[in-house]
Every structure is written in C-alpha cells, then in structure tokens.
Amino acid sequence: MFNELGFQGMHVFKDVPKFSFFHKPTLLEKLEKLSGELGVEVYVKRDDAIEFAMGGNKVKKLEFIVGEALANELERKGAKPYVIPLGRAIPTGVLGYVEASFEIAKQVEELGIKPKYIVHASGFGGTQAGLVLGSKLAKLEAKIIGIDIIGKPELPQKILELTREASEKYGFKANVESKDIIVYDYSFGGYGVLSEKITKIIVDVARTEGLLLDPVYTAKAFAGLLDLIGKGVIEQGSQVIFIHTGGYPIIFQHGEEMFKLMKGES
C-alpha cells in the first residue's frame, strides 16, 4: 500500500521512512540579468516550483515528517495525533534540507560551479539546520547564510540545537559549531510586516527575471542578499545560491496591501 502512495526510504538516509510528494530534483538556474547587474553570479534553487501544495520548503520537510508519522502509525496500530510545530522545525523536518544539500552538491558539480554562499529565509530554524548539517555531510564548501525574517535573537541557538538533535537521532557524523551558524536580521519590523521597500523588490525581481517572491519570507531574504552584496559581505565575482523557499499563497493573502504600497498609499 505505501509503495503505491509513494512511501519510500531515502538512499541518503538508510532506513529513514519518507513519503514522496513531488518530482526531484528541483531546478537550479542562474538569474542572468540580476547577476550582470550585481556583479555576483546568483543561482536560484527553485523549491517554489514544487508541484505539491504550491511548493516551498515546508513540503520538503513534510516528506520525512509524514513518512515517520505513517511508520509510527503502523507500529501503534492506533489513531493518535502527530503534532507538527511551526516551520516543521523538528529533527525529522531537518532531513528535508539535509537531503537538499546532497541534491545541490550534485547539481553544482554538473554545472561546474563552486558557490561560496547559500542564502535563504530563516524563520524557525529547520531549513537552516538542514542546510548547515547537510552541507557538511555532502561536503559542500559554501557558507550557509540565514536571513532572519522574524527578528529572533535566539534563532542561532535554536538552529544549533536542531543540528545536534538531528545528528543524535539519525547518527550523522558532522561537527557543527556555533561559527557555522550565520544569521543576519532583515526582519523589517517583524514577521508579516510589509513595507514599500519589500514590495519594490518583489516588483523589480518579477520584472527583471520573471521570478515571484513573497512579502513575508523570500522578498526579505532577497533584500538581505542584495544588502550583503552591497556591503561587500558577499564579494564581487562570487557565486551564490539563493534558496527560493516558496510562499506563493502569502502573495494572495497580502495582495491588497501590496497593491497599495506599490501605488504609494499608506
């Protein structure tokens, strides 16, 4: 029954149950026009293009969470709730981006590139924990930069704890230290707070590359990326991967407010 539904073990993680929701790998493609303007080669990992549930990073985490829940249900043979916290920020959810790191490692080898940085929106820590842990296991040399889109001083510690919890649970041999957790705050007033600057970035990126960003996660992360390039933290001539973590439903949720900001209305 489970094979018919897509229930499978992941080849990277022996004996770890997984429920497949989408085709892999997601694309890794260069933003040609923006790369020329910025003087930095920017590649985007198109996790927004996942076909299930309008895509995004949470779907990647959900594959392992649902897999574990189904496996547990078989063991218990009873109906009990499986609690999933915000952002799927639990050791099982971390596996989504540990797996993604191996996928990225294969793609950059195929493209013949050596990205120095991987930048993404970091909210509750699960995605970043997976990327930090996965980059070590997959021998990716890129620094993982999380853009804090909420404004949580405790986020780096939460990420570190998640990497250690996942390593303990699944037996990963990776030495993650505090210095590996790189976080910059670009929350722009807090979670879900929109601004004219963020709306302008959404419009500019859509017009330049045909790439949609959302106002809560990815547009703030892209604003952080642009600012870090401007400040020289991300050096000219370097290669960067931007993880597009999805968020398309949020565009509809905030559509009216965004339209007002585009028109310059308060």
Image (cartoon, rainbow, N blue to C red):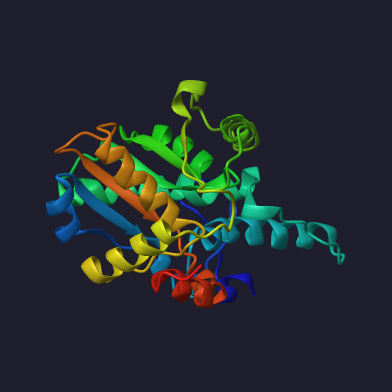
Q: In this view, does 248 lie above or below 173?
A: below
Q: Tell me where residue 194 appears, x and y as whole percent.
A: 51, 60
**Rendered residue at 32%/38% (across/down):** 228
The residue closer to the viewer here, 194 or 251, is: 194
Q: Tell me where residue 90 appears, x and y as whole percent.
A: 66, 45
Res. 12 visible in picture: no
Res. 190 visible in picture: yes
Q: Tell me where residue 79 appears, x and y as whole percent.
A: 86, 67
The residue closer to the viewer here, 76 or 126, is: 126
Q: In this view, does 36 lie above or below 174?
A: below
* Drawn side of residue 241 relative to residue 265, left or right: left
**Rendered residue at 19%/51% (across/down):** 110
**Rendered residue at 57%/35% (across/down):** 159
Q: Tell me where residue 87 appears, x and y as whole percent.
A: 62, 53
* Drawn side of residue 163 relative to residue 135, left or right: right
When asked about the image quadrant of residue 210, the answer is: bottom left
**Rendered residue at 28%/65% (across/down):** 204
Number of numbered tags placed on the structure image: 0
Q: In this view, does 93 lie above or below 133?
A: below
* Drawn side of residue 146 relative to residue 15, left or right: left
The residue closer to the viewer here, 187 or 125, is: 187
From the image, which quarter does the N terminus lie in?
bottom right
